[in-house]
Amino acid sequence: MRCFVSALLSQMKAKRKAMGFRQEDMATRVGMSRQQYQRLEQKGNPRLDTLELMAKGLQSELVLIPREKLGLVRQLLGANTHDAVGVAEDSPLYDDPWRDILGDVE
């Protein structure tokens, strides 16, 4: 579980940077102190409602997608069927359904 939260927070941080927001900007957008926001990005372990606030601040939504439907959702959204390093979704090496869930931000 810890790895998932860490990966999600890393993607949220990358999205924040891609949008040109500083931690202080995001803290203001979601209604918390900069120190609280900084601690979340660095150490993690946010509550679900905090993740929802962070997602809204990034003009995004948190969505739980069943693994068996992930390919269909990506197809519907027009997403590439390969992850960032070129591993096909049907490859045994592809095991991270949350990779790039916030879009290509790197």
Image: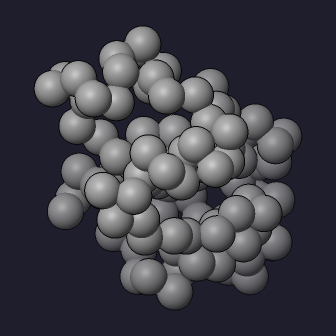
Residue at the bottom extreme of this rendering: 49
Q: Residue at x 49, y 51 (%)?
A: 72
Residue at x-position 54% and y-position 54%: 73
Q: Residue 24, position in %: x, y?
A: 76, 59
Figure check: 5 above or below 105:
below
Left or right: residue 27 compared with residue 12: right
Scheme of colours in the image: one colour
In the figure, residue 95 lies in which quadrant? Answer: top left
User: Image point 78% across, 63% down: which residue?
Assistant: 59
Is 88 on the left or on the right of 9, as rendered?
Answer: left
- Give residue 64's quadrant in the image: bottom left
Q: Quadrant of the C terminus?
A: top right
x and y, in percent, of residue 3 in the image: 23, 50
Depth order, front residue of 79/100: 79
Image quarter in which the N terminus is found: bottom left
Q: How many marks?
A: 0
Residue with the most extreme top position: 86
Asked whether residue 54 appears in the rendered view, the answer is: no
Q: Is residue 103 above or below residue 82?
A: below
Q: Residue 89 at what x, y percent from top left?
A: 34, 30
Residue 34 vertical position relative to residue 80 in the rendered view, above or below:
below
Q: Is residue 3 left or right of residue 22?
A: left
Question: Can the viewer see residue 15 in this picture?
Answer: yes
Residue 104: give x, y in percent of width and height.
Answer: 64, 32
Report the front residue among 106 and 85: 85
Q: Residue furthest left?
A: 92
At x 53%, y 80%, the residue is 50
